[in-house]
Amino acid sequence: MEIKKVGVVGSGAMGTGIAHVSAQSGYEVVVYDIAEAAIGRSRDNIASLFDKSIQKGKATEELKAETLGRMTFTTDINDMKDVDLVIEAVVENLELKQKVFNQLDSIVKPDAILASNTSTMSITKLATSVKRPEAFAGVHFFNPAQVMRLVELIRGYYTSDETIKSLQDYVRAIGKESVEVRKDVPGFVVNRLMLIQFKEAQLVYEEGIASLEDIDKAMTLGLNHPMGPFTLMDFTGLDISYDSLVYLHNEFGQDKWAPPVSLKRMINAGRLGKKTGGKGWFDTSKK
């Protein structure tokens, strides 16, 4: 199936990024959120990013106008009725996601592909909410979606080859690279590897082996990572790391996935990183 029109459900950071890169690549895009204020912020954020790029000479007013002109922002989920692909990007809550897909299943056209941007949850379980699980898959972008080049394409138990092929074409058309996750396992590829690294970094810190700063320095200079694990957790949100570890711990039933005490302490203190004004592992609130 050729994808020409893309729907995005959820206008937070991930949904906005996915919508932005899709529209800039020539797709018509419909962005849905239940809250009018959230929709307004999404559009404003895209316009603001364009303005910064224009000031740096990396974009033009024409590109900004063309991209925003391809986008529809709505609080009516029925506006998804004629999209070819819907990507869900709501919070990591299984019941909420299933509710969204059950609703979408009765709205979208018969040959539309339904996909979730979930970073850890079972695609097979999410697909139980729709009548055509063969047209359901995981499409996991990374934050910020406008910058990060990788998209994980995750097969559920029933996902068809045709669905994966259409999604591979879409990912290529928006200038990204994809990897195919052939088995629907918690954490997929990247988060399964990353979260265990996050946990080990926290244990190294808890054991007094090195400071937060030196652990981050070791990973950036020793392994050439663009960010150390603590800086990255602050950027994406400590609550996301915590919730993902809890989910993997419940799914695998292995102690190695249990959230460390230091992470629980930060969650209890309300220090979630960038989303709490820069107060996370590090305090950048005054910088």
Image (cartoon, helix red, strand yellow):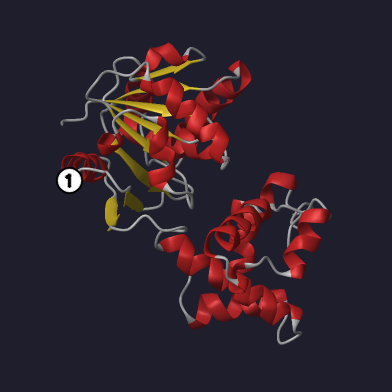
Residue 257 image position (x, y, % from top left): 59, 68
Left or right: 198 in relation to 159: right
Q: Residue at x 50, y 24 (%)?
A: 43
- Seen from the viewer's position, the closer of residues 122 and 76 is 122
Q: Quadrant of residue 69?
A: top left
- The local crowd at label 1, few if under 14, some if 14 to 19, many if 20 or more residues have their Cα within 10 Å, is few
Q: Is residue 177 above or below residue 125?
A: below
Q: Quadrant of residue 20?
A: top left
Q: Is residue 155 above or below residue 42?
A: below
Residue 77 image position (x, y, % from top left): 45, 16
Left or right: 269 in relation to 198: right
Residue 156 image position (x, y, % from top left): 33, 47
- Residue 200 in view here: yes
Q: Residue at x 43, y 28 (%)?
A: 101
Q: Residue at x 43, y 39 (%)?
A: 126
- Seen from the viewer's position, the closer of residues 206 and 51 is 206
* Residue at the farthest bottom position: 209
Residue that mark 1 sits on: 161
